[in-house]
Amino acid sequence: MAKMLNARPNKNAARSGKTLGGKQTAVIEKEQTTEKISQPEAVQQAVPLSEKISVPAGSDAVEAFVKKMREMVEPFAYMDDDIIRKNTDLAVGNGMSADDRTISFECAHYIMTNLAYIFMGVVLDESFRNTFVECLNVEIEFDKKSEEQKKKIRDKMKDKKPYDSMGSIVIGVSSFSPLVDKLFSAGLAEGFDTLEKHEDEFDSAVEALTDEEKTKLGFLFSNWMYLIRAFTHNDLFMSYIVTVIEKVKGILNNRR
């Protein structure tokens, strides 16, 4: 994790508002999806729900995101340049609709804040990793389906939304607002700081990964736009992620 931690945003810079620069089925059973995403407390205090915000992420932000992600996953994932280029094209509207490129603020904030836990999970736990890959493959194959098939697939993925979203991020349109950038940067840095004490465990797991496993992880993160679409359109997958992460947090907290 040492190299990955070095690639994270500096916590002080983030707080000052500097920019970021066993196998499961693809549709997770509802009994497993007990945890929900809520609005970040800082956002609840900063922006009333009545003042809905639009938070687009532009092409410059896309390039910065890809560069930062590559730096963070490089120790444990073999990224594919061709797949990355395809996903970057999708991010700026070449092959994905605006709806497919839209993610709620709350979902995006949760992913960014808990990205370190996601990295730990896909490296340390084969079941968690396989679920990510399976749900990613569902998204990749989704575009080949008829409109009727697409509707049926999405209907199976739906879960009741537990909150009123205060806004959304449309990938590939413009740039983050200062408030959103500050919150995302701070959340990302604090997530990695929380797991710093588990650095040795993570590094040992990375060293034990085979080339095949690193290739699978590279395929996963190279297809980052399809992952984003899974996060925002496969509600049961997202709820599964939240459930696992919150359980892991509880286990780690009990170790203290």
Image: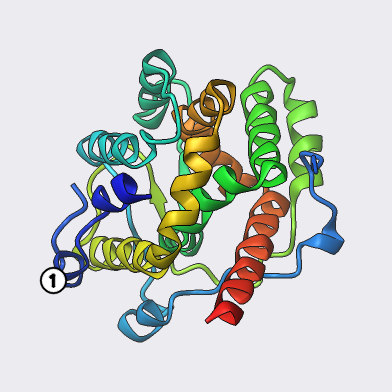
Q: Is residue 228 left or right of residue 11?
A: right
Q: Position of residue 73 (x, y in %)?
A: 39, 38
Which amino acid type corresponds to the residue marked 1 in the rendered image? Answer: Ser
Residue highlighted by disc 1: 16
**Residue 174 image point, x, y percent:** 24, 44
Task: Using the rendered image of the protein, determine whether residue 99 is visible from the camera's viewpoint.
Answer: no
Picture quadrant where residue 81 is located: top left
In this view, 144 is above or below 93: above
Q: Residue at x 68, y 64 (%)?
A: 243
Work out whether residue 4 can be spotted: yes
Q: Residues within 10 Å of mark 1 (few under 14, many from 20)?
A: few
Of residues 87 and 175, the one nearer the viewer is 87
Quadrant of residue 24 in the image?
top right
Residue at 45%, 37% (x, y): give it.
Answer: 98
**In the picture shown, does residue 240 fall above or below 76?**
below
User: Residue pushed farthest top?
Assistant: 82
Query: Along the horizontal axis of the image, is 72 left or right of 159?
Result: left
Quadrant location of residue 30?
bottom right
Please report the residue visible at 55 percent of the width from the left and 72 percent of the height from the top: 164
Tell me residue 60's x, y (percent). Answer: 20, 37
How many numbered discs, if any? 1
Depth check: give the residue in front, 185 or 2: 2
Residue 192 coordinates in the image, percent (x, y): 37, 61
140 sits left or right of 69 in the view: right
What residue do we see at 81% from left, 36% from top? Answer: 152
Dot 1 falls on a residue whose secondary structure is loop
